Image (cartoon, helix red, strand yellow):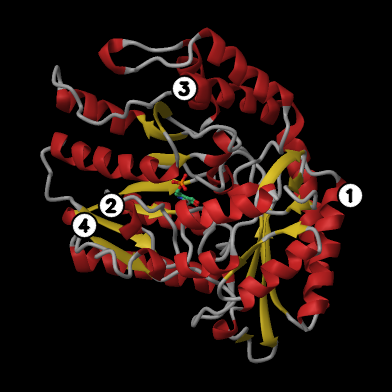
């Protein structure tokens, strides 16, 4: 009963993010009710293993008392404090300091946002300001990678390189450019790591040369591409791209909105390649999705240039909810969890997940298995030899999502027949084994 009336209210009033409005009206909403650990329960009582941590964000899992208590304490004590007028709050200051301590290199300065899109958007504004402060305002061209996702803000959606975020919106803009992705499974240069790295390095050098290094402001990259279908570059790819940026005095921005906070093993994925970006964007696992928050981490050089450039003038960038104290308190509670076993558990669970998914490679539908840590995908094909994608017109992704749901599994089914996995880092062995078993059942039913 309750569920039916909610479905009607949803259909009439709630606009869902990144969805076909008309298809959604036809299928109706599925309403989630509660969660514990890696298990969700919907309003009908159906239990589901959450193989996607909500939207790659609930790293700590559901029902973590320490997070809930930290939020409650802060809500009671001081639910809001602006950062304007030189004011601040205890948790926001402590969270900034802890992030600076934990982040690689000299990423010592933290600007808090409400999520990933406005973190990316903030970097664009900060980078523009940085070059103005340096007296080089002509450095205003931005480069990102095909299949990349950098949010859906007005400016950031153009750095995103997925068609749905462009068509009908008038993006990308003329100052936004792309280089080909490192996607190994279907790469024209083949799948050998050195060939892929060489091709990406050549493409970035060529793009910088085409635009003129004196005009290129920054290069944006996800250490592993998430929304493009979990595309994992070879080891050292990030390092090689970072080196090209250094050669040409181009700022290197690592978008760690998904890959941060233990998703792929270390606290930040950049650590795996020993790369210190000039700016880093984070969100999702920062607060494990319990409350909204994102952050821009900025190197000493970028921060000092902006600060000196502004002198006594205000740097006109800020939100009412920047450094929200409740979000910051939640962020601190999450960091406590990461440092006290959650990262470690995520690493162990990540090995088990990857092993389990690799064992699915013998399934007739599985063309590719890829991932690192608790971020993975399998790519389905109808002919392994020819790598024939599932027919898009049959809405295969949606049908697989529905079947998985019926089997008690929540995963992401990308339109192109890619199944995405990003379970909570708190998963037990039984949770991971359940995700794999339910995937196999779903694939068998799809044959
Ligand atoms: N950057 C990356 C790499 C992301 O994956 C996302 C979201 O998935 C964003 C930015 C945007 O974050 P948000 O959805 O919090 O605005």
User: In 3D space, how far apart are the residues under numbered discs 2 and 1 (Cα atoms)?
Assistant: 42 Å
- The reply to whether callout 2 and callout 4 are in contact (CB within 8 Å) is no
Answer with mark 2 or mark 4, whichever residue precedes in sequence: 2
Answer with mark 4 or mark 3, whichever residue precedes in sequence: 3
Numbered disc 3: secondary structure: helix
The residue under label 4 is: 213
The residue under label 1 is: 430
User: In 3D space, how far apart are the residues under numbered discs 3 and 1 (Cα atoms)?
Assistant: 36 Å
Q: Quadrant of the C terminus?
A: bottom right
User: In 3D space, how far apart are the residues under numbered discs 4 and 3 (Cα atoms)?
Assistant: 33 Å
Label 2 CB-ligand 1 distance < 8 A: no
Foreground residue among 405 and 65? 405
Residue 74 spot, x, y in % from top left: 55, 14
Numbered disc 2: secondary structure: loop
Residue 405 spot, x, y in % from top left: 74, 62
The residue under label 3 is: 96
- As drawn, 353 above or below 38: below
- As drawn, 311 above or below 298: above
């Amino acid at each position: 009963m309750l569920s039916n009336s909610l479905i009607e209210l949803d259909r009439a009033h709630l606009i869902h993010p990144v969805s076909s409005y008309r298809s959604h009206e036809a299928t109706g909403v599925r309403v989630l009710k509660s969660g514990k650990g890696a298990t969700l329960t919907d309003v009908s009582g159906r239990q589901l293993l959450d193989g996607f941590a909500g939207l790659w964000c609930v790293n700590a899992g559901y029902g973590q008392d320490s997070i809930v208590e930290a939020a409650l304490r802060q809500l009671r004590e001081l639910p809001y404090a602006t950062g304007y007028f030189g004011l601040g709050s205890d948790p926001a200051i402590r969270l900034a300091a802890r992030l600076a301590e934990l982040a690689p290199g000299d990423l010592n300065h933290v600007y808090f946002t409400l999520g990933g899109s406005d973190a990316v958007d903030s970097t664009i504004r900060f980078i523009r300001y940085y070059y103005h402060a340096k007296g080089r305002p002509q450095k205003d061209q931005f480069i990102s990678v095909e299949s990349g996702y950098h949010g859906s803000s007005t400016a950031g959606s153009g750095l995103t390189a997925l068609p749905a975020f462009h068509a009908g919106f008038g993006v990308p803009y003329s100052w936004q450019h792309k280089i080909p992705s490192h996607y190994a499974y279907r790469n024209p240069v083949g799948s050998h790591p050195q060939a892929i790295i060489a091709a990406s390095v050549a493409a970035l050098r060529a793009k910088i040369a085409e635009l003129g290094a004196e005009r290129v402001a920054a290069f944006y990259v996800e250490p592993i591409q998430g929304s493009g279908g979990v595309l994992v570059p070879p080891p050292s790819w990030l390092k090689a791209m970072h080196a090209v940026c250094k050669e040409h005095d181009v700022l290197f921005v690592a978008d760690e909105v998904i890959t941060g906070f233990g998703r792929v093993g270390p606290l930040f994925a950049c650590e795996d390649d020993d790369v210190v970006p000039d700016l880093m964007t984070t969100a999702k696992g920062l607060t494990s999705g319990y409350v909204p928050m994102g952050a821009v981490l900025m190197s000493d050089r970028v921060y000092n240039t902006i600060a000196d450039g502004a002198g006594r003038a205000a740097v006109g960038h800020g939100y009412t909810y920047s450094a929200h104290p409740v979000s910051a308190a939640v962020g601190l509670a999450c960091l406590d969890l990461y440092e006290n076993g959650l990262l470690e558990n995520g690493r162990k669970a990540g090995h088990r997940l990857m092993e389990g998914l690799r064992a699915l490679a013998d399934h007739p539908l599985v063309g590719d298995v890829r991932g690192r840590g608790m971020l993975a995908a399998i790519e389905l094909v109808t002919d392994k030899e020819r790598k024939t994608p599932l027919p898009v017109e049959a809405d295969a992704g949606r049908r697989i999502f529905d079947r998985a749901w019926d089997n008690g599994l929540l995963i992401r089914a990308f339109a192109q027949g890619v199944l995405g996995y990003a379970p909570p880092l708190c998963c037990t062995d039984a949770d991971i084994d359940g995700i794999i078993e339910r995937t196999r059942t779903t694939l068998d039913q799809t044959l």
